[in-house]
């Protein structure tokens, strides 16, 4: 393989550079195949690009056709064909910048990038931290982040309302919302609730308003409405 035996030739002839042979007993140069993307081909021999390199072109004749991934990134396999196969290494995430210089950036405080492949949209936010959107890199510590943490600087057991995690659509614990997850989301049953801060023993949460307190709130609201009517 890697060569062909032309009619009248005394020895096998190697396939031309940029092509390779995989058929034993090939009799014609036309039976040599084009070197596929993700590889380069010396005369008759196909060689895959190593990990951390990629080649989007065919018929490559030199190892330099395999281009290195941007800084702080690598590929997960041999013979990669696109820069989009380059994933950022541990402690880095892939940004929205498609230039080689901005492909990967160091993961900010409040995130954990313990495995390769983190992206801006899949950043793993630590418990006790909050970011407003999947496209934001503005990761901030929540006011209640230290609850149930003692002296720990990194606290996976924080009872903060800021749950963290990889899902940017659900940054808060159940029933909580708003900036820093400190607001109660009104349930469809119409029950009035109030926000309860995190403690060392309980997660931040929403609790149902006591009936007496609710009645007082409604009475005050009615009185305020009446006063505004008279003033108007």
Image: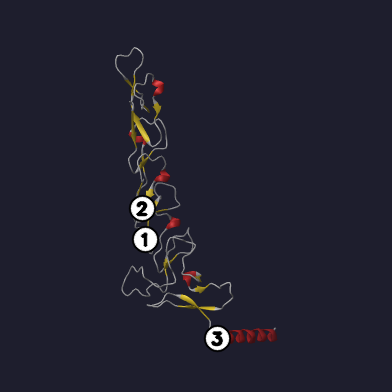
CB contact under 8 Å: marks 1 and 3: no
As measured in the structure, the alpha-carbon distance from the residue carrying label 2 to the one carrying label 3 is 51 Å
Please name the residue that numbered disc 3 is placed on.
213
Q: Which of these two is toward me, 11 or 65?
A: 11
As measured in the structure, the alpha-carbon distance from the residue carrying label 1 to the one carrying label 2 is 11 Å
Element type at marker 1? loop
Camera-side mark, 1 or 3: 3
Q: Which mark is residue 116?
A: 2
Task: Classify mark 2: residues with Cα within 10 Å, few (<14), some (14-19) or many (20+).
Answer: some
Residue 182 appears at what percent x and percent y? Answer: 48, 73
As measured in the structure, the alpha-carbon distance from the residue carrying label 1 to the one carrying label 3 is 42 Å
Q: Which of these two is toward me, 135 or 116?
A: 116
Q: Is residue 13 above or below residue 216?
A: above
Taking the spot 41% from the left edge, 21% from the top edge, the residue there is 30
Taking the spot 51% from the left edge, 73% from the top edge, the residue there is 183
Check the picture and name the quadrant holding the N terminus: top left
Residue 207 appears at what percent x and percent y? Answer: 50, 78
CB contact under 8 Å: marks 2 and 3: no
Please name the residue that numbered disc 1 is placed on.
112
Q: Which of these two is toward me, 155 or 110?
A: 155
Most distant residue in the front direction:
24
Element type at marker 3? helix
Task: Classify mark 1: residues with Cα within 10 Å, few (<14), some (14-19) or many (20+).
Answer: some
Q: Which mark is residue 199?
A: none
Element type at marker 2? loop
Q: Is residue 101 above or below residue 221?
A: above
The answer to which of marks 2 and 3 sits earlier in the sequence is 2
Task: Classify mark 3: residues with Cα within 10 Å, few (<14), some (14-19) or many (20+).
Answer: few
Taking the spot 41% from the left edge, 43% from the top edge, the residue there is 83
Q: How many numbered marks have been drawn onto this rendered protein structure?
A: 3
The answer to which of marks 1 and 3 sits earlier in the sequence is 1
């Amino acid at each position: 393989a890697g060569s062909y035996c032309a009619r009248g030739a005394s020895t096998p002839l190697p396939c031309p550079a940029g092509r390779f042979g995989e058929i034993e007993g090939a009799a014609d140069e036309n039976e040599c195949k084009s070197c596929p993307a993700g590889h380069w081909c010396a005369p008759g021999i196909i060689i895959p690009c190593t990990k951390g390199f990629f080649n989007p072109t065919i018929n490559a004749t030199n190892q330099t056709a395999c281009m290195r991934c941007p800084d702080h990134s690598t590929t997960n396999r041999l013979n990669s064909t696109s820069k989009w196969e380059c994933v950022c290494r541990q402690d880095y995430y892939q940004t929205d910048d498609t230039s080689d210089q901005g492909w990967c950036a160091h993961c900010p405080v409040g995130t954990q990038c313990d495995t390769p492949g983190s992206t801006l949209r899949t950043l793993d936010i630590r418990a006790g931290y909050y970011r407003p959107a999947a496209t934001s890199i503005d990761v901030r510590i929540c006011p209640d982040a230290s609850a149930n943490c003692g002296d720990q600087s990194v606290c996976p057991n924080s009872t903060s309302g800021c749950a963290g995690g990889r899902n940017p659509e659900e940054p808060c614990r159940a029933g909580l919302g708003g900036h820093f997850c400190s607001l109660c989301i009104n349930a469809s049953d119409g029950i009035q609730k109030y926000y309860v801060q995190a403690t060392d023993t309980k997660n931040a949460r929403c609790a149902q308003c006591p009936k007496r307190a609710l009645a007082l709130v409604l009475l005050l609201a009615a009185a305020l409405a009446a006063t505004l009517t008279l003033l108007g």
